[in-house]
Image (tube, rainbow, N blue to C red):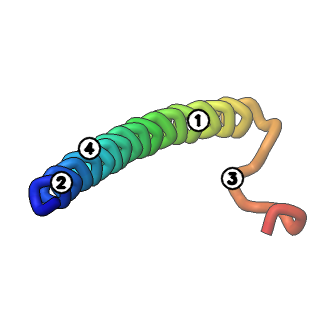
Amino acid sequence: MQKERINAMKTLIRKAGKKGQSLVEYGLVLVLIAIVAILVVKAVGTQTTSTFDNVQSQMTSSGIASTSPTAASS
């Protein structure tokens, strides 16, 4: 009887350890995905800002737009 209880406890501990390990692995994967997503959004944001700055400077140099904000944009 005592041996059965000990074996049952060992089995429960092994199963709990595997579940905890899986949870940690999923957490690490989630953190990695979040870091990659942040880096991609940052890179795309920088590229988009650069593109809009180039468009604005070309429009300003050709006299299409002014550098001061209009009432609609403020």
User: Considering only order in the chain, which callout, 4 or 3, is on the residue closer to the N terminus?
Assistant: 4
Residue positioned 89% across, 64% down in the render: 72
Q: Which mark is residue 18?
A: 4
Q: CA distance from mark 3 to mark 4?
A: 61 Å
Figure quadrant of the C terminus: bottom right
Q: CA distance from mark 3 to mark 2?
A: 81 Å
Q: Which residue is mark 1?
A: 48
Q: CA distance from mark 1 to mark 3?
A: 19 Å
Camera-near label (3 vs 4) is 4
Q: CA distance from mark 2 to mark 4?
A: 21 Å
Image quadrant where residue 3 sits: bottom left
User: Considering only order in the chain, which callout, 3 or 1, is on the residue closer to the N terminus?
Assistant: 1
Nearest the viewer among 57 and 41 is 41
Camera-near label (1 vs 3) is 1
User: Considering only order in the chain, which callout, 4 or 1, is on the residue closer to the N terminus?
Assistant: 4
Q: Which amino acid is tagged 3? A: Thr
Camera-near label (2 vs 4) is 2
Crowd tier of the residue under label 1, counting other residues whose Cα lies within 10 Å: few below 14, some 14–19, many 20 or above: few
Q: Which residue is mark 3?
A: 67
Q: Horizontal and vertical percent for residue 64?
A: 82, 37
Q: Is residue 41 left or right of residue 6?
A: right
User: Taking 70 as reference, is 59 above or below it?
Assistant: above
Figure quadrant of the N terminus: bottom left
User: Considering only order in the chain, which callout, 4 or 2, is on the residue closer to the N terminus?
Assistant: 2
Nearest the viewer among 1 and 35 is 1
